[in-house]
Image (cartoon, coloured by chain):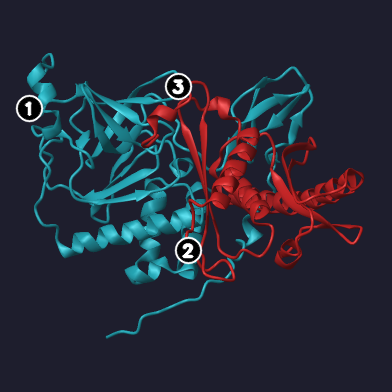
Chain colours: A red, B cyan
Amino acid sequence: MRGSRSKALHDRALVNCQYSMATFSTGERKRRPHGDRKSSEMTLHLKQTFEAAILTQLYPRSQIDIYVQILQADGGNYCACVNAATLATIDAGIPMRDYVCASSAGFIEDTPLADLNYVEEAAGGPQVALALLPKSDQIALLEMNSRLHEDHLEQVIEAASKACKDVYAVLDQVVRDHVHEVTTLLGE
Amino acid sequence: MAAIEIRLPVARKPVVQSLAQGSDKHLVAPGDTITTDTGYMRGHGTYMGDEKLVASVAGAVERVNKLICVKALKTRYNGEVGDIVVGRVTEVQQKRWKVETNARLDSVLLLSSMNLPGGELRRRSAEDELAMRDYLHEGDLISAEVQAVFSDGAVSLHTRSLKYGKLGQGVLVQVSPSLVKRQKTHFHDLPCGASVILGNNGFIWIYPTPEQKDEEAGGFVTNLKPVSLHDREVISRLRNCILALVAQKLMLYDTSIVYCYEASLPHQIKDLLKPEVMQEIVLETRQRLLELEG
């Protein structure tokens, strides 16, 4: 661990995340890439999500750094970060319980919508962000803003779950193809 | 002035599957069930999740009698006793140096495991402790052997032989530890005119072959004599060959590096970094290695 030795946990690894947005990622040039309230909240969410998924018991007194930078903020920032960080963690060989797939969902005109884009998010309706471990259907993080009637909650979560499973199918295919390619090339 | 070549980024094409020997390996991704048979012991890369053995990394399943483990494609270096490593000193502490070796925890080089100049054998005194910084300070590169592994996985190094010690002029290439083949010796003098140390931790050191082996120095005096242009070119070419082998995922050992060097001779050194040239020379290397085996 570099620096922050006092934060070392004696029995498991510390997951250190940083969420930053490039200055050119939003419509108007962003002054502070990281350190503002929104970024800190996203950082905390990412940390909680990955602490649930990574098997941290295997690495006492160590630190795992996950740094994500948004290049284009066009809806579903947190979800894209989670999916990208999942692939990065698998590539680094860090043991995880399962993939973590995330998707957002909303509720506009009595219809649940999955994977909202920037325009749909900016409309101000209720939005739910769901991070799921697809094999066991365990929810790593569920976040909602604005107001949603409880009768509609189940449909919205259902839509988000289905989108997460679709994302899982794509990520899994990519990982398997890569593992197959590398194993074939290595030969032994 | 020659024109500078600029390329736009394009999606990487997957490697031609003509080499596929029909992989009989069981490939898994995190969350995949390996087996529901409870008779197996779980090894690295797996965890127990309600009555079944689940993989936690992406890689190939290895089964040794009753032990199942999953070997990940790319990991940090896991130390084993007897390995040769190349590391960089990061800290000078009271009676030890902390060395970075691409492992999860920093490796430790104790003062008592280090050779003194002249090869003397005596108890380390307080003066030795104060003079530690003169031997090795932060940023120095050393070659060492793994003496022991602590319970948390940290590695303890020693430089108890005259062939280990501080490294002088040369080029360091950092690759993944899984690409370095385990062999009897990791110090090679290549016929092309340079020498190479293949560290098990993935750090590869390429340096000009010393004319005479000075036994008295024991790795303390760094040779700062200017290196000739011919030697520098050989070293640069070797470095680019190693990067090509890594990009095409071929195991690194002395024979593969020498064959790759010979295959690269028709090209200019700077052209070796282009993807199509890399693919070509590594394909040629692969064919020569297959002929060697068969």
Determine whether, in the image, residue B273 is placed left or right of residue B33: left
For mark 3, give the secondary structure.
Answer: loop
Measure how far apart labels 3 and 2 are at the Cα level: 43 Å
Q: Position of residue A187 (x, y in %)?
A: 57, 46
Is residue B156 shown above or below B102? above
- Disc 2 and disc 1 on one polypeptide chain: no
Q: Position of residue B254 (x, y in %)?
A: 37, 47
Residue at which label 1 appears: B118
What amino acid type should be assigned to the residue bearing mark 2?
A: Arg
Q: Position of residue A48 (x, y in %)?
A: 62, 37
Assess whether mark 2 and mark 3 are in contact (beta carbons under 8 angstroms).
Answer: no
Determine which of the numbered discs, if any, sits on residue B216 in the image: none
For mark 2, give the secondary structure.
Answer: loop
Q: Residues within 10 Å of mark 1 (few under 14, many from 20)?
A: few
Q: Nearer the viewer, residue A28 or B103?
A: A28
Q: Nearer the viewer, mark 1 or mark 3?
A: 3
**Residue at (62%, 49%) from the top-left corner?**
A87
- Disc 1 and disc 3 on one polypeptide chain: yes
Q: Nearer the viewer, residue A183 or B147?
A: B147
Q: Nearer the viewer, mark 2 or mark 1?
A: 2
Q: Residues within 10 Å of mark 3 (few under 14, many from 20)?
A: few
The chain holding disc 3 is B
Residue at which label 3 appears: B152
The chain holding disc 1 is B
Residue at which label 2 appears: A31
**Residue at (67%, 26%) from the top-left corner?**
B47
User: Would you identify the image quadrant in which residue A120 lies?
Assistant: bottom right
